[in-house]
Amino acid sequence: MNSNKGKKALFLSLVVMTTMALSACGTNNDGQKENAGAPTSSGTTSESPANSSQAKELSLFIDASWYPVKEWKGPVAEKITEKTGIKLNVTVATDDKQLPLMIASGDLPDLVFTYANINRMSDSKLSYPWNELIEKYAPDFKIDPIRIAIHTMDDGNFYTIRNSFATQEEMAKNKYSVGSDGNPGIAVREDILRELGNPPIDSIDNFVKVLGMVKEKYPDMIPLIMDKDWIEQYFLQQFGVEGLLDGWYERDGKVDYAIRQPEMLDFFKFMNRLYREGYILAENFAYTNDQIDDQYATSGKAFAHSHTVSVADTDNIKVKNAGGSYTFRMLPSAISTKTKAVSSGLGFAGTFITKKNKDPEASIKFLQYLASDEGKKLTMFGVEGEHWTWNDEGYPNLKYDPSDADYVNSNGIKWWYLYNDGVTEGMLSYVPGAQKTKALMERKAFTVYKPELGLIQLQPDSDEKTIKTKIDEMIKNEKVKIYLAKTEEEAVANYESMVKNAEKIGLDRLADWANQTYQKKKDLFKK
């Protein structure tokens, strides 16, 4: 996807496979610990009205101001209505404060789709437990035990199932499920590489050498421009850092905050080197508009563009549409022997049936259809026959380019994934010959899944939540001082100061709590 920065590139997909720790708190639940393998959710195709005017209307609030689809229209929405007898009256958030205000006022719609307020909405005062609705209205709606276990709250209920989640076993069984757009990548100008003699970019050092060659031969060109939301991810992985700056990592059965990883200092020294040698712009760390980097790359003012695995495909579409003749190609997903990707996410976003819902029975049956094999494929790929056909090898032959955001969004493809899974979503990216597909297949080879880390979840208004919020805000400010330090020594000192500040705020207490939580939750994933 490329419109509005791929709509946060599946900030979505957080995770999605590497979008990390956007997950709900789970509890140990005997009898629900074993992974049942691939999702077994099923639904019966409804004999509901095929005419939209006869359909039952439910209100849906999408808690994501960047969301690319604003109305229930297009062939996918129409087909879902035909199959379920439900159409949605959609409202997209204006900002991240709107849903909390709605919760406080009690002014909720029938359905809420959110990633940032999963824990807050998982409350019997606000939402119906799915397990109760399934038992009462949809007893043949089967959800595999591991998904139930990781979404079960302390009261014994589960109030949603996130989309975009898959276990390592599920991904391994599906060779054509390669992941989502929400993974980091860097694209470089092919014409300039040729003019430089096609130097190899097969290591971090060689990449830096090429940036130096670009700076010397093309002094008016920015060697590397970075999307404001994807500055760190690619390079963190090249240095073997697990997770993001505001997440957890695990070593030898214990967890700690990511900034205290031994590999983290090498990452910061590298980023500081890029700045000191003039390969990145200081203002890149202050961008508030996520289109600025696109404009540099597609107007010929930048050599390398850091964003997601689809950045080459989407940049090439934009350049071609603007009449340009040059093309971008992806760097390998790994240019280091240390490269590691750890997926700790439990999915992206979930749908809640609120206590204000006018028809809970219709709502849970609507979600049951979306959870069926037919529903998941319709949501993610489009209308069968019109948008895709099924390949006998086990993947969809798409009749469109999934990187063409205008086409995808206008047809309502993918974005009605109010219930889906990471396996189905991962197949949307399998387009033979596409650079994004190649990058994701490379990435799949070095990805390790640790979803148990995603269960380290902070409750709203808890002391731990307060501590983490303060630490993360401090890191957001202090990391830029490390990047923009005038010397490596200053960068090291600024990094050490950042860690000490985190410890003063209460990092040790937070880490102790995280370890206690981790030890309780990790058994959910034991076979």
Image (tube, rainbow, N blue to C red):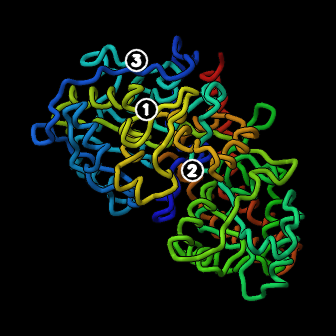
Residue at 27%, 41% in the rendered image = 111
Residue located beneath label 2 in the image = 181
Label 3 or label 2, whichever lies nearer to me, is 2
Residue located beneath label 1 in the image = 161
* 514 relative position to 22: left or right: right
Residue at 63%, 24% in the rendered image = 173
In three-dimensional space, the C-alpha distance between marks 2 and 1, rounded to whole angstroms, equals 21 Å
Residue at the farthest top position: 31
Q: Is residue 453 above or below residue 334?
A: above
Residue at the farthest left position: 54
Give the image location of residue 172, x and y in percent: 66, 28
Q: Earlier in the sequence, mark 3 or mark 2?
A: 3
Q: Earlier in the sequence, mark 1 or mark 3?
A: 3
In three-dimensional space, the C-alpha distance between marks 3 and 2, rounded to whole angstroms, equals 28 Å
- Which secondary structure lies at badge 3? loop
**Looking at numbered disc 2 in the image, what kind of residue is underneath it?**
Asp
- The quarter of the rendered structure image containing the C terminus is top right
Q: Residues within 10 Å of mark 1 (few under 14, many from 20)?
A: many
Label 1 or label 3, whichever lies nearer to me, is 3
**Looking at numbered disc 3 in the image, what kind of residue is underneath it?**
Lys
Q: Residues within 10 Å of mark 3 (few under 14, many from 20)?
A: some
Looking at the picture, tell me which residue is in the foreground, 523 or 385: 385
In three-dimensional space, the C-alpha distance between marks 1 and 3, rounded to whole angstroms, equals 12 Å
Residue located beneath label 3 in the image = 142
- Which secondary structure lies at badge 1? loop
- Which secondary structure lies at badge 2? loop
Tag 3 near tag 2, CB within 8 Å: no
Q: Earlier in the sequence, mark 2 or mark 1?
A: 1
Give the image location of residue 345, x and y in percent: 58, 40
Instruction: Please indicate, yes or no, whether residue 372 appears anywhere in the rendered image.
Output: yes
Give the image location of residue 382, x and y in percent: 39, 41
